[in-house]
Image: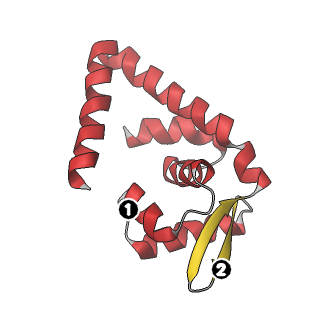
């Protein structure tokens, strides 16, 4: 599944992990790294590394407000949102064609449920 995701997300120029990070930031500009780590179920140090790399590439920027850090998309980051959504749709279509729509919907629902339980 990860291989398929990375193949579909290639249209964005990012791996699926970086695309998911950018999508999260695009949907909630000013999000704090702690919330990103909870949303993505990653350690804070991993999120910091991902954000630093995306900042270096020019897709996000960090702003420091007192003792907190907020992460915002840049224009370049916001511009990728449509491609990210297209990649998600392509991925869903691809595994739906293999599993069948009903099974693909079950898989999606189960993955969402599992994520919610883990949180």
Residue most toward the front?
66
> Measured along the vertical axis of the image, is residue 116 above or below residue 70?
above
Counting from the top left corner in percent of width and height, residue 33 is at 50, 69
Asked whether, in this view, residue 16 is left or right of residue 110, the answer is right
Q: Quadrant of residue 111?
A: top left
Where residue 75 appears, as percent x and y from the top left, is 79, 52
Whether 115 is drawn above or below 60: the answer is: above
Residue at 26% in and 19% down: 103
* Residue at x-position 71% and y-position 52%: 77
| Residue at x 45% of width, y 22% of height | 94
Tell which residue pokes out farthest to the bottom in this image: 67
The residue that disc 1 covers is: 38
* Other residues around mark 1 within 10 Å, as few (<14) / some (14–19) / many (≥20): few
Residue 46 at x, y = what percent? 44, 70
Name the residue nearer the viewer: 68 or 111.
Answer: 68
Residue 71, given in percent of the width and then of the height, sits at: 62, 66
SS of the residue at dot 1? Answer: helix
- Label of residue 101 in the image: none
**50 left or right, relative to 75:** left
Quadrant of image for the N terminus: top left
Residue closer to the observer: 95 or 102: 102
For marks 2 and 1, the one nearer the N-term is 1
In the depicted structure, whether residue 25 falls above or below residue 54? above
Q: Which residue is mark 2?
A: 64
Q: Quadrant of the C terminus?
A: bottom left
Instruction: Report the front residue among 90 and 27.
Output: 27
Inspect this view and state whether residue 11 appears.
no
């Amino acid at each position: 599944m990860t291989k398929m995701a990375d193949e579909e997300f290639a249209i964005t120029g990012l791996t699926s992990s970086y695309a998911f990070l950018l999508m999260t930031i695009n949907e909630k500009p000013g999000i704090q790294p702690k919330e990103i780590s909870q949303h993505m179920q990653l350690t804070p140090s991993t999120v910091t590394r991902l954000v630093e790399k995306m900042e270096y590439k020019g897709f996000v920027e960090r702003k420091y407000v007192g003792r907190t850090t907020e992460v915002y998309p840049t224009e370049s980051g916001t511009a990728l949102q449509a491609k990210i959504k297209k990649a998600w749709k392509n991925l869903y279509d691809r595994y739906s064609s293999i599993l069948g729509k009903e099974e693909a919907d079950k898989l999606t629902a189960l993955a969402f449920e599992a994520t919610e339980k883990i949180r």
